[in-house]
Image (cartoon, helix red, strand yellow):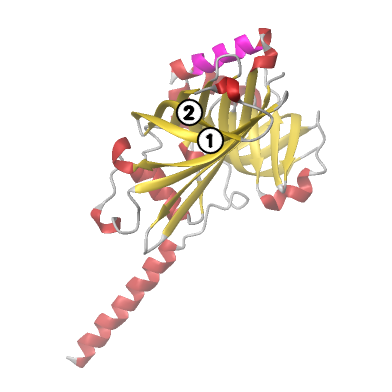
Amino acid sequence: MKILYAFFVCLFLVSFTNAQERFLTKKGMISFFSETPIENIEAQNNQVLSIVDASSGKMAIAILMKSFMFKKALMQEHFNENYVESDKYPKATFKGDIIDFDNITTSEITLAIKGNLTIHGKTKEITIEAVTKKTDEVIEMTGNFFINLSDFDVKIPSVVKNNISEKIKVSFRLYHKTYKK
Amino acid sequence: MKKISIYILIIGLIGVFIGYKMYNKPHINVAEKPVDIALTASILLADFSSNETSANTKYLDKIIAVKGMVTTIEFDGEKTAISLQTKDDFGSVVCYLTKEEFKKSTEIKEGQEVVLKGICTGFLMDVILVKCIIMNSK
C-alpha cells in the first residue's frame, strides 16, 4: 500500500516538471456486470483514479473496492465482506503499457494495453483493448473486457453459484485531463 | 395433522417474507444515521497519509462529518464533487454528494466553509467520501 502511495507521489513530483505529459482523472468510471439466467448484478464506481504518461505510454489505475455502488444494499455487503474482502484488500490496481501509444490521434482508434491487474490481492497479466482519443488537453479511453473470478481467487459459495457468473464483464470510461495544480 | 401443516405454511411464508425483505434491504440513509466521527479535512487526510492501514480500520464504512473550506466544486449532471482544502499540498478530501443534494450544492461557493456528512470508502490521492449530504454551509 505504501509503495503504491509512493508511486503516485512520484508521478506527481514528475508532473510538476513535466506538466504537459501527464494526464489524469480522479473521476473515472469502472463498472462490472455479471449475467446469469437468475439475476444480473451490476455495480458502478465513479471515483476511479487513472494516470497516463504521454511521454512513455504508461498508465496506472487505482480503485477503491468500497466505492462500487450496487443497486441492492445486500449485494454490496456480500461483495465487500465475502467476495473481495474489501477490509483486507481495499484497492484494485492496474499498471500497464499502452502498446503503440504514438499512434494515438485526435480521432478514435483502438489500442491494446498490456499490464498487471491486481484484485483481491492476486495479480494477473492481462491485455485489454480500449478505444482511445487524444487532444492537447484530453486523453479519452473507453472499452470493456472480461475477467474470471477464479483468476483472482474470489470464491463464490455453492448456494449462490447460479446467481453469479464466473466471467465478469468490466467496462471503463476514463476521461483524463492534463494535470495542473 | 391439518393444523401442523397450516403452521408450517405460515412459518414458511414468514421465512419467505423475511428473506425478501433482506434481499431488498435499503441502502444506508446517511441523513438519518448518527455521525460516528467528526473532524476537519486536514486531520482526516493527515491520518490517511501517515498510516493508511490504521486509518482504513478507523474510518472505512463509518459515517463521517468533515469540516473544511471548499477548493473546487464540480458538477457532472446531477452528481456533485466537492474538494476540501487541507494543509497537504497534494491531497485533499473529495466528497461525492447524493443526487438529492444537487439543488443545495449549487448554492455552495468556492472558498466557503462547509460541513459534509458521508461514508468514507478510502484513500487514493485524496480521501474519498461518498453519499455525502450538506450539514452546514455557513
Q: CA distance from mark 2 to mark 1?
A: 7 Å
Could you tell me if the residues under marks 2 and 1 are in contact, i.e. CB atoms within 8 Å? Answer: yes
| Image coordinates for residue A91, horizontal then vertical, percent | 45, 31
Magenta stretch: includes residue A8: yes
* Residue at the image position 22 percent from the left and 86 percent from the top: B5
* Residue at the image position 71 percent from the left and 19 percent from the top: A180
| Image coordinates for residue A146, horizontal then vertical, percent | 41, 43
Q: Determine which quarter of the picture holds residue B127.
A: top right
Does A16 appear above or below B82? Answer: above
Which residue is under mark 2?
A113
The amino acid type of the residue labelled 2 equals Ile
Does A142 appear above or below A72? Answer: above
Which residue is under mark 1?
A130
Magenta residues span A5-15
Q: Which of the pair A122/B33 is nearer the observer?
A: A122
The amino acid type of the residue labelled 1 equals Ala
Determine the chain carrying the residue at label 1.
A
Instruction: Please tell me whether mark 1 sits on a helix, a strand or a loop.
Output: strand
Determine the chain carrying the residue at label 2.
A
